[in-house]
Image (cartoon, rainbow, N blue to C red):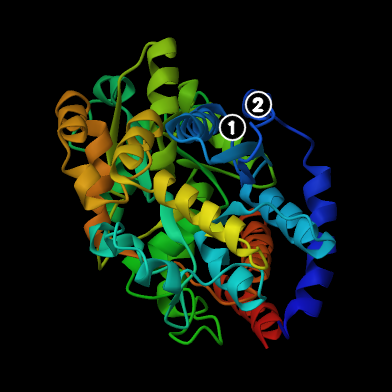
Amino acid sequence: MKKLSFLLILMYTLLVLAACGGSESDGSAEANSAEASDGKVELTYWYAWGDKIGENNENLVKQFNESQDKIHVTAEFQGTYDELHAKTQAAFAAGNAPEVTQNEIASIGVFAKSGMTQDLTSFVENDEEINMDDFNPGLMGNSYVDDKLYGLPYLRSTPIMYMNTTLAEEAGLDLKGPGTWEEFEEYAAAFTDGNGRVGMSLPIDIWFYEAFIAQAGGSTMNEDGTEVAFNSKEGAEAFDLFRNMSNEGTMKVSAGTEAGEKARQDFVNGHAGMHFASTADLSYLLQLAEEKGFELQTYFMPSGKETKVPTGGANLVMTSGLDEEKQQAAWEFIKFMTATEQTAYASEFTGYLPSRLSAAESEKMQALYEEKPQFKVAVDQLENGVARPMAENYPEVVKIMIDEMTRGILDESIPTEEVLDTAAEKANAVLK
């Protein structure tokens, strides 16, 4: 726990930022907060995101509570991943952390190395019921820290490309979608009509940048996570793709805390023909597309020199310092939430990837892929999945990268090399 003092300082900074984000709530947590019967082990579970994702969490917790009579779990919504992480850190410092929570996968290392989350290795070794080989190998890269298991894949994702095929047909585009960067630029130009519609509306988001750097043949950080590597030829190629399309007017780039929502609204309202987003948005976007009266299809991210994509989403983790009874109860809950049946349920309900092979191969999921092939795209794309960086200070690196990329997008006079070198200098100072 030698890093805890630094992390607590960071915690208070994050907490202030999180507090500025408002107190959004889906109001459904109260449904699971009824007092449990005498003798039940009480657990609290914190989760991120509302809408369909929030409903899924509440529904699964309700199913768990009804499936047995020894443990009662109360689910509580905590906002975005950043807000969830900040609140968890603050609660841990105050001694009242939830027993189970989510770690966005790039933060698994931060929480594990600071001593806030429990090593789950022994739980797996002593439990004959769980089959770790059933978890999709493409999702396990962010589950281990120093060869120890700290989280099980739960609501996991990759970024995928969404396209308004109704607009695409009107623009005379092939509905097979853009397979390469060059085709992506061509499609974006064809969608752009000079009357406010662009090819792509994109938030300045590090996840998408990680994808394009990997496709260019580069990486965001070096292998041991001690220095950044985005200030490279490959990093410049990825950034210039966004920058050039923005300058040409075929891509609208948004910055700030509401950038993701702005990009989504542009797409849903027909002001952009294409949209990058998590597969977790699929169910919701299909619903919105139906309401707005257009057809929606999903595609692999356009490929550069290589075909790669970062994984994303969250793992379920157990906070450290629990007594044995609470540990065992938390482990049973984590097992339930990541089991085959619940994994298939969550995937169908939200669009998140089925993290278990048995879930993807189940009759339920195969029937869904037959009926709605949009759901299968992210599963197929997972063959190209790569883990996200897990350096202890990577969340701070991300903030620096976003700030500098925003500066570069807004001021085209700044050379790309200067944008990336400035970001790298600041990021490496944080890492050291």
Residue in the image at 52% along x and 78% along y: 231
Query: Which structural element holds mark 2?
Result: loop
The quadrant in which the C terminus is found is bottom right
Q: Is residue 36 in view?
A: yes
Nearest the camera: 429 or 8? 8
Mark 1 nearby-residue class (10 Å; few <14, some 14–19, many ≥20): some
For badge 2, the amino acid type reads Asp
Please state the horizontal and vertical placement of residue 52, each as a whole percent of the image.
49, 28
The quadrant in which the N terminus is found is bottom right
Nearest the camera: 321 or 289? 321
Q: From mark 2 to mark 1, how far is it between C-alphas?
A: 6 Å
Tag 2 residue: 26
For badge 1, the amino acid type reads Gly
Tag 1 residue: 50
Q: Is residue 271 above or below residue 399?
A: above
Residue in the image at 41% along x and 51% along y: 335
Please state the horizontal and vertical placement of residue 143, each as a whole percent of the image.
43, 67
Mark 2 nearby-residue class (10 Å; few <14, some 14–19, many ≥20): some
Q: Do tag 2 and tag 1 residues touch (Cβ < 8 Å)? A: yes
Q: Within the image, what quadrant is residue 12 found in?
A: bottom right
Q: Is residue 308 in view?
A: no
Residue in the image at 51% along x and 33% along y: 65
Q: Is residue 378 above or below residue 214?
A: above
With 199 as the anchor, is 408 left or right in this view? right
Query: Which structural element holds mark 1?
Result: loop
Q: How many marks?
A: 2
